[in-house]
Image (cartoon, rainbow, N blue to C red):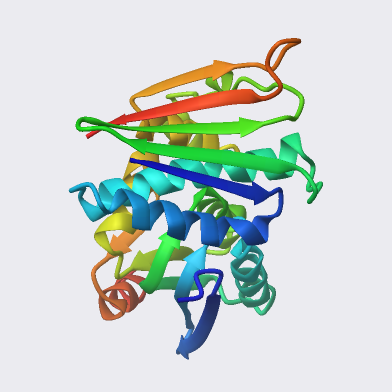
Amino acid sequence: MMLDIKINAKLEELANMRQQIMSFIKNVSLDNEVANLIVLAVDEICTNLIKYAYKYNQNSIIAVLVETCPHQIIIKIKDSAVPFDIRQHLDKNICEHIRKMVPGGLGMPLVGKIMDEIYYEAKNDEREFNVLTLIKDI
Amino acid sequence: MNNNKFFINTTKEDTVCVLHLNGFLDALTSVVLEEEIKKNVDNNCFKIILDLKSLTYISSAGLGVFMLYIEKIRKNEGDIIMTNLSKSIFEVMNLLGFDEIFHITNTVEEAINLFNNS
């Protein structure tokens, strides 16, 4: 099964996107907590794209594709902004950062802790979009 | 269901401010919490309880707000105590180790007692 969502790059669109993804993945037998974490990971990525990649340019588009497989949920997030490989920012030592009470910078490490596999393909002459793939084993 | 919705009801128990958070706390709505904590800190209320009983969702933007004023609050012999966390909200906090740096209680009354006994 596949869910295909497109949103404009505005924070007001996140709530509806979260609701659609939650309804879709609830078709798979998932704990509420796990479903919430998957939705949260997508929310964090899209928030980052809206704020930092698209710089709140509301005409820009983010495409989110969610696929449920028997043992995995696969999410592809496509954007056309300047490529940014989040895998460089998944600092697993975020707890130390938090102990020092430094606000901000929590989103990408959170995604790293939630997802099992993360891949990134930057746009190029042959590919129009950057594609971030998030995989959660279930 | 409007899941853009977030609002706060604030009550006061002697010197303790209790912020009852309702709805969805994300990048869009976190400014509401930031303003409310700032307002209380500006009014010299440094003992703050965040009642998360009716909080449905939290993202890192909301978690970031918890850290924004904590240094100033603790310097003024106060603290932020979180209470009534759902399993989903606790799971998110636990992933980032928030449960190690913030007091978490089961009820508002326990949080008030923690302040009164400290």
User: In screen coordinates, is A61 left or right of A104?
Assistant: right
Q: The C terminus of chain A is located in which quarter?
A: top left
Which of these two is toward me, A58 or B59? A58
Query: Is A88 on the left-hand or right-hand side of B100?
Result: right
Q: Is residue B50 left or right of residue B31?
A: left
Q: Outermost residue, top direction?
A: A125
Query: B93 above or below A92?
Result: below
Quadrant including the N terminus of chain A? top left
Q: Nearer the viewer, residue B19 or A132?
A: A132
> Dividing the picture into quarters, in which one does residue A72 lie?
top left
Looking at the picture, tell me which residue is in the foreground, B3 or B94.
Answer: B3
**Residue B84 image position (x, y, % from top left):** 29, 70
| Picture residue at 18% right of the left edge, 48% below the top | A29
Can residue B30 be seen?
yes
**Can I make out residue B99 in this image?**
no
Q: Quadrant of residue B115?
A: bottom left
State the image coordinates of residue A84 (x, y, percent, origin top left): 67, 22
The residue shown at (44%, 47%) is A40
Q: Nearer the viewer, residue B61 or A43?
A: A43
> Residue B116 in the image: x percent, y percent?
34, 77
Q: With respect to residue B93, does A16 lie above or below? A: below
Residue at 65%, 16% (x, y): give it: A122
Residue B64's spot in the image, x, y percent?
56, 50
Q: How many labels, in total?
A: 0
Q: Residue at x 48, y 83 (%)?
A: B15
The quadrant holding residue A45 is top right
